[in-house]
Image (cartoon, rainbow, N blue to C red):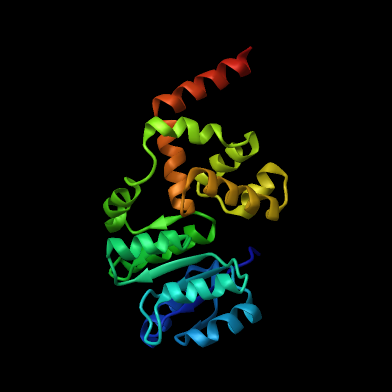
């Protein structure tokens, strides 16, 4: 029997918690190990239940979701987080991406779309509501231009380029570690170096950077050069 993904819900609306719990449990491959609307309970619950994924509301009665995320990261918890919110604000999306979330979903999405996206996030993919893709593109326009991409990529080691390629496929650190036969901590270190060297704020930006570079003139030349090297 396939092991179920363990999910934790943080939302101060009881109806939302119960409804999402029912939908996730109905999938058959996920189980909700804890649901709460109290930010003070989040860290103790994380330590006790050690979920594989957290679904976090952006607006809580006592505080905001990103403050909760920063709190758990300061405690050394690396549990992936998906934001589920009513806010379609570009500023909120940008702030969530800077905080390193794995996904940003909207509560007015169809329930089936939300559950499917959470399932993909649990497999290590990055997910953003389709209604937010234009705003995501606008946020990323402030990133490095094609003319400097080559120099930035040249600053990466060969291993860092390999890790970036896997990040661009939406793979988790665990999956990357297995694919490259290195430790999980080594992958985390490479990702941190990649972010610093490319001046990126999240894995979403890293994935988009890698995609844009591959489709830029510099990226095409690099791919052709690599193919020639392999053939010869």
Relative depth, front residue between 199 and 56: 199
| The quarter of the displayed image where residue 181 is located | top right
Query: Is 78 situated left or right of 215 in this image?
Result: right
Q: Give the image location of residue 75, x and y in percent.
A: 61, 74
Residue 56, visible in the rendered structure? no
Q: Give the image location of residue 193, x and y in percent.
A: 59, 47
Residue at 57% in and 53% down? 172
Residue 186, visible in the rendered structure? yes
Q: Is residue 13 above or below residue 156?
A: below
Number of callouts: 0
Query: Is 138 situated left or right of 166 in this image?
Result: left
Relative depth, front residue between 15 and 199: 199
Q: Give the image location of residue 175, x and y in percent.
A: 62, 51
| The quarter of the displayed image where residue 93 is located | bottom left
Residue at 35% in and 78% down? 59
Relative depth, front residue between 225 and 98: 98
Image quarter of the N terminus: bottom right
Residue at 50% in and 82% down? 35
Image quarter of the C terminus: top right
Q: Give the image location of residue 76, x and y in percent.
A: 62, 70
Residue at 50% in and 19% down? 224
Relative depth, front residue between 182 and 138: 138
Q: Is residue 60 above or below residue 204?
A: below
């Amino acid at each position: 029997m396939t092991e179920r993904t363990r999910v934790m819900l943080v939302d101060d609306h009881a109806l939302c918690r119960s409804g999402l719990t029912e939908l996730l449990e109905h999938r058959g491959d996920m189980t909700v190990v804890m649901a709460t609307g109290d930010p003070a309970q989040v860290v103790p619950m994380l330590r006790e239940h050690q979920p594989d994924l957290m679904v976090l509301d952006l607006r809580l009665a006592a505080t905001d979701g990103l403050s909760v995320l920063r709190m758990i990261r300061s405690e050394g918890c690396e549990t992936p987080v998906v934001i589920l919110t009513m806010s379609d604000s570009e500023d909120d999306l940008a702030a969530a991406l800077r905080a390193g979330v794995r996904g940003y979903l909207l509560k007015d999405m169809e329930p089936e779309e939300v559950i499917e996206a959470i399932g993909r996030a649990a497999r290590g993919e990055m997910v953003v509501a389709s209604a937010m893709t234009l705003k995501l593109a606008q946020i990323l326009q402030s990133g490095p231009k094609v003319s400097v991409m080559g120099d930035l990529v040249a600053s990466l080691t060969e291993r860092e380029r390999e890790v970036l390629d896997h990040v661009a496929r939406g793979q988790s650190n665990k999956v990357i570690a297995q694919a490259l036969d290195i430790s999980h901590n080594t992958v985390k270190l490479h990702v941190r170096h990649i972010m610093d060297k490319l001046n990126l704020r999240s894995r979403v930006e890293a994935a988009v950077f890698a995609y844009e570079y591959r489709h830029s003139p510099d990226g095409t030349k690099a791919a052709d050069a690599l193919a020639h090297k392999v053939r010869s």
